[in-house]
Image (tube, helix red, strand yellow):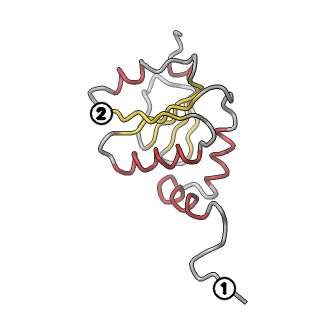
C-alpha cells in the first residue's frame, strides 16, 4: 500500500495551501472558483496588485491562475498612480476587480472580502458614474 507522506492527494492542494497561508481561507481554490463563476462570461477580471510588494504580486498571480478560463489583466499600481489606474478601468468589458493585499478605496461600499487579503469589487461599484 502506498502512503502519501507529503499531504493529501488533492488537485487543489498547492493552491489551497497558498491561499490558506496568504488569506487564511481553507479550501480557497473551490470557494474562489464560485466567486469568479458569478462574473458574466463575456467580461474580464482586473487584478490590482501593489507593485513591489511580493505577497501582493504572488497573490495576484494565484488569483489569475484560479480565474481560468476568465480573461484577466493584472494591474500593478504604486501609491502615486493608484487613483488614476482605478479610474481607467472601464465597466463595458470588465466584470469585476480583485484587490490583492491592497485595500480598495474607502468610497467603495459594495465589495466581497475573501479572507484577509483579497477583496472583490463588481465594476459598477468601482466607477458608479459610468
In percent of width and height, residue 18 lies at: 51, 59
In percent of width and height, residue 77 lies at: 34, 33
Q: Could you say which quadrant of the image residue 2 lies in? A: bottom right
The residue indicated by pointer 1 is: 3
Instruction: Determine the residue located farthest toward the top in the rendered image.
Output: 129
Q: Could you say which quadrant of the image residue 70 lies in? A: top right
- Residue sitting nearer the eye, 87 or 68: 68
Instruction: Determine the residue located farthest toward the right in the rendered image.
Output: 1
Residue 7 left/right relative to 81 = right
Q: Residue at x 65, y 40 (%)?
A: 35
Q: Residue at x 64, y 38 (%)?
A: 36
29 w.r.t. 48: above or below: below
Counting residues from the start of the chain, the first of labels 2 and 1 encountered is: 1
Q: Residue at x 58, y 59 (%)?
A: 16
Element marked by disc 1: loop
- Residue sitting nearer the eye, 12 or 17: 12
The label shown at residue 46 is none
The residue indicated by pointer 2 is: 78
Amino acid at each position: 500500500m502506498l502512503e502519501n507522506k507529503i499531504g493529501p492527494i488533492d488537485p487543489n492542494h498547492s493552491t489551497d495551501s497558498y491561499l490558506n497561508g496568504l488569506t487564511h481561507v481553507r479550501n480557497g481554490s473551490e470557494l474562489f472558483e464560485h466567486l469568479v463563476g458569478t462574473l458574466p462570461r463575456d467580461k474580464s477580471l482586473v487584478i490590482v496588485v501593489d507593485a513591489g510588494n511580493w505577497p501582493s504580486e504572488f497573490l495576484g498571480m494565484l488569483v489569475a491562475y484560479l480565474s481560468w478560463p476568465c480573461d484577466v489583466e493584472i494591474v500593478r499600481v504604486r501609491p502615486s498612480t493608484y487613483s488614476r489606474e482605478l479610474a481607467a478601468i472601464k465597466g463595458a468589458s470588465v466584470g469585476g476587480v480583485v484587490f490583492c493585499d491592497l485595500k480598495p478605496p474607502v468610497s467603495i461600499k459594495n465589495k466581497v472580502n475573501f479572507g484577509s487579503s483579497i477583496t472583490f469589487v463588481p465594476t459598477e461599484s468601482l466607477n458608479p458614474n459610468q
